[in-house]
Amino acid sequence: MLHSDRRRRVTLEPLAVTQALLGLPLSSVRRRAAALSADLFLVFLYSLVLLPAGILFTLQWQEPRLLPRLGELLEQDQDPWEDTEFLYYLMRMATRHYPACLSPELRELVVAEDLQGLEQVLGKYHIQGTISFGEVYNEPYVPDSRQVVLTLSSVAGEDSKVLNFLLVLVPYFTLFAWWGKGKTPGKLLFGIRVVRLTGGPFRLRDSFNRAGGYTASLSTFGLGFLEAVRDPNRQALHDRIAGTVVIRAGRKMYREFPPAGAAEAAQGVSNGED
């Protein structure tokens, strides 16, 4: 009975779990993949709002005078890319993170904080700003080209590499799973939920640990997700980190405090995989 239920229902191997979970049907890998795909699509939609806000926060944190100066210029209906002070703040950030995007002449003036000298030479350069979402992109200065490209990653540095994950993925999978008591919108759509192996309410801490565990699954080139294929309880790497398992929840067989006999009630559910 134990071996026939592997990867179909929650079992004791290789973990000790609350008795209320035993026998409940596990989500299939296909259903979990479909739910994750739905969640990632929603992540993309709401990242269109959050990422610009995150970029502004990052820039303000690294260069406090940048955004106030930008506000002054916009209020006066002036082009920021023609303002020496605004460009100075951007280039000062670039000298810390990716100085190769500037010419030696510009770097020397920025390091010396010589705004007057900078204003005199800026007319010789064509300065372009570029924001590239989802990737790190830098363009070095080509000698004698007079073309300076200031990208998000060259200005914000390492912060831009984790911007998507910290401001989009982690909050989404943390907050929605917590609010939904183990169900993100994608999991709700496909009738599955995350539960704690030890039982009890799905806490914010559990949700955060599981969302953070995605870094481990991703850092293994996605192999952490594939652990769910062979694991007896279909635990991916992030499930092991958080101490959770994903079950079918369409019939509300399991709640935060499951009643006695919950496992027996699950016997009426089909044993077939989705």
Image: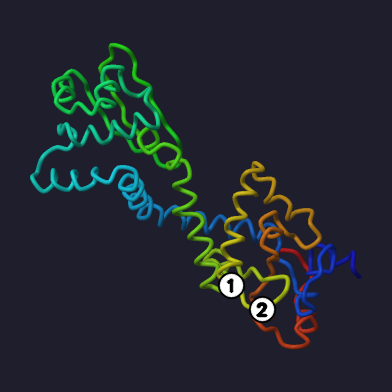
Name the residue: 30% across, 32% down: 92
The type of residue carrying mark 1 is Arg
Q: Nearer the viewer, residue 121 or 3?
A: 121
Specify the quadrant of the image occupied by residue 27: bottom right
Q: Which mark is residue 203?
A: 1
Q: Nearer the viewer, residue 11 or 174?
A: 174
Specify the quadrant of the image occupied by residue 132: top left
Tell whether 207 sits left or right of 3: left
Cα separation, mark 1 vs mark 2, equals: 9 Å
Furthest residue in direction bottom, as rendered:
260
Q: Quadrant of the N terminus?
A: bottom right
Tell whether 144 sits left or right of 219: left
Give the x, y percent position of residue 230.
79, 53
Name the residue: 65% across, 49% down: 217
Mark 1 touching mark 2, by CB under 8 A?
yes
Furthest residue in direction front, as rendered:
112
The total number of labels drawn is 2
Q: Quadrant of the C terminus?
A: bottom right
According to the picture, the residue beneath numbered tag 2 turns out to be: 200
Q: Secondary structure at mark 2?
A: loop
Q: Residues within 10 Å of mark 1 (few under 14, many from 20)?
A: some
Name the residue: 32% across, 44% down: 59
Give the x, y percent position of residue 109.
24, 23
Tell whether 52 sits left or right of 178: left
